[in-house]
Amino acid sequence: MTLDLRKLQQSLSKYSAAPIYFLVGSDEFMVDEAIAAIKEKVVTEGMDDFNYNQFSGTDTRGVKILEHVETLPMMSDMRMVLVRRADALKEKDWNILTTILQDRVDTCSLVLVFNKIDKRKKYYKLGQKNGVIVDLKTPYDNQIPTWIDYIAHQNGVSLTPEATGILFQLVGNHLIEIKNELIKLKSYKSSSDSNPSSEVKISKDDILKVVSKSKFENVFQLTKALGQRDRGQALYFLAQLLDSGQNEIATLALVKRHMRILSHVKKVMNTGLPYSKLGSTVGVPQFFVKEYSSQATKWTDQKINSTIDFLKDTDMALKSSPVSSHIWLENFIIKSCEG
């Protein structure tokens, strides 16, 4: 059986937890949400010390995992064993774990977390047959506003539609960073509100005051300079961003999103659609429409398409080349802004 996060949460609200879960995905927020949902169902509150164990496949062997799975729960029907980085387990570990993948232990939920998984492997086929595969794909850009509202609700925050759109523009599609920024916004707004209500309301101005002061200001400035094809400014803000600790691959993901939006804006502008409707059609806040429109005029369709193709090559190089990541990013900016 294969579920997404929402269907996993629904199944846990109606039925008992399964004895085996494979959580597959690299999005930290979604993985943590899935783990929390399973743990809430399986482990009785206050019984973590007796009925919950957590390991990492990088430094734990299969025999130890098997030992804890087969340990009977204390004062409860079920216990939970969580293994992060299960993709780091060795073949000999999987040979040991095959026992519990074939003959499920009904007194334990074994939760294995994979960044990626090889569907050809025997353990995957056993997990699919005797357990639940949870596919935790990173949401598409058009799904992020809904996720922002979901995370906001979880944390006692409500955002205006414009605020949701601007948060997405500044932070991107990294859900764990969205969560961190919402927590920061809640703290900021609660401390400045002399009469706080049970739900903290966040506006566009609140986001621009708080989020833009973080490293995301450099992200915004980087994409703006790139959109304007200003090589010097783009290289400057790239250096600022990397010096602040931003991951190169995450930086490229934000640039890719910006170029996709710019391409969409360019296409819609070519149709002659009224300026007032551009934001809603493209899916960006009206607050950013003027800037995107200005940037789009500096690009031909051919240049945008070639730049997006070059982004794919740069992404592959970042993940596989021994050359320092910042050099690939600098090379991308130089080539994108020339001509």
Image: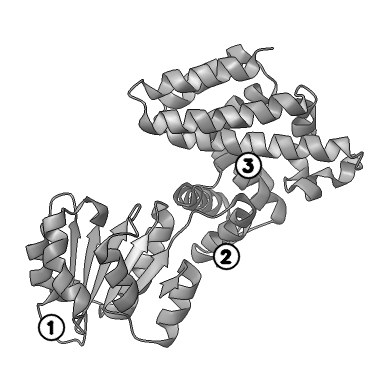
Q: Which badge, 1 or 3, is on the more N-terminal residue?
A: 1
- Mark nearer the viewer, 2 or 3: 3
Cα distance, mark 2 to mark 1? 39 Å
Residue 293: percent from left, percent from top: 79, 32
Amino acid under label 1? Met
User: Which quarter of the image is occupied by the C terminus?
Assistant: top right
Residue picked out by circle 2 = 199
Up the image or down, 217 lies above or below 82; here it is above
The crowd level at tag 1 (other Cα within 10 Å; few <14, some 14-19, many 20+) is: few
Residue 94: percent from left, percent from top: 17, 62
**From where the camera sits, is residue 215 visible?**
no
Cα distance, mark 1 to mark 3? 48 Å
Count all numbered tags in the image, as a single digit: 3
Up the image or down, 274 lies above or below 47; here it is above
Could you tell whether 216 is left or right of 281 in the image?
Answer: left
The crowd level at tag 3 (other Cα within 10 Å; few <14, some 14-19, many 20+) is: some
Amino acid under label 2? Glu
Element marked by disc 1:
loop
Seen at 50% across and 71% down, the residue is 6
Q: Image quarter for residue 298?
A: top right
Residue picked out by circle 3 = 169
Residue picked out by circle 1 = 74
